[in-house]
Amino acid sequence: MEKIIKKENYGAKFKTSPYFFIISRIVVYFFIAIIIFPLLYTLSLSLRSPDTVYSARFFLIPEEFSFENYVIAFTYNFHGVTFPRMFLNSAIVVTASVSLIIILSIFSAFSFSHLKFPLKETLFNVMIASVAMPAQVLIIPLFYILLYFGILNTYQAVIFAYAGFLIPIGVLILRMFFEQTPKEISEAAIADGASDLQLLMKILLPLAKPAIATCVILLFLDTWNEFVYAMIYLQNPELHTVPVALAKIGTSRYYISIGAYSAAIMITIIPVLAIFAIFQRWFIAGMTVGALKH
């Protein structure tokens, strides 16, 4: 008779057969390997010397380790613009975009969760429904709007574009968190004479670290890897962000070795790993907001 394994996770009981346990782990590890292998192969290419870039032991271990490719990537010059400059452009755009989105999302989410005003739910539903609209649909109208205001080919062009499309995501996550906060806390603060702003800044925000961390990580990934808007609205090479720079370097008529190109890719991954390492302790908690009721 098939043995049944019972285990308890977060108050929920599951019954799992040993066969299902083994097969599910095999499937999970298989897909993890598929996801990780391209990253490991790119890392391997970046650590190979120019003479041995196309040879390796067991396909991944370089025959000769070298950091020369990273030096080439940092000193590479594309139309007078170096890779560190492109990296700085991305850092400026992403920092400004995420900061603006988080600030606006906090106040919007608080308004939708704690304040009463006409058509509140209708406005919220329209905002969330806008997420389903493909960003490519608004490329041309937004181009003429930015041109009219004279901010095309400036950092503000992509910062405002990113904010307009990603604020609904921040509002959705933060509103869910604010609504899960026990009402007794808010009622006690109001009874003590706290204003709406004091309730938000001194009571809710300190409790919202998991939700904010979730927003920061998701928004950072979206803005750091965004390509289409950055390519169209930042046509000046001196303003190119990392995704645009990598695409143009990889398809340009100027030769760059596959090892140096792989090194440039690995450099662009560092900020993503750093952000996740900083916020990961709150990220998991933030992703489970609303999943359980106490």
Image: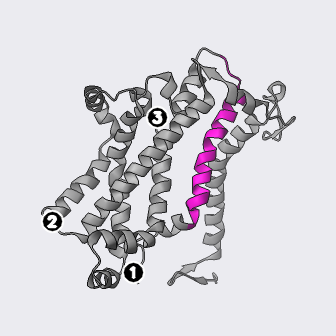
Mark 3 = which residue?
A: 227
Q: Could you tell which of marks 1 and 3 lies nearer the N-terminus? A: 3
Residue at (49% x, 49% y) in the render: 220
- Label 3 environment density (alpha carbons within 10 Å; few <14, some 14–19, many ≥20): some
Residue 62, percent from left and from top: 83, 37
Residue at image position (23%, 59%) is: 124
Tell me the residue at 69%/34% (across/down). Answer: 263
Q: Amino acid at mark 2?
A: Phe
Label 3 amino acid?
Phe
Query: Going by the image, does 5 lie left or right of 122?
Result: right
Write down the residue under mark 1.
Answer: 293
The numbered disc on residue 117 is 2
**In magenta stretch: residue 174:** no
The quarter of the image holding the C terminus is bottom left
- Numbered range of the magenta stretch: 255-281
Is residue 225 visible to the viewer in this orientation of the structure? no
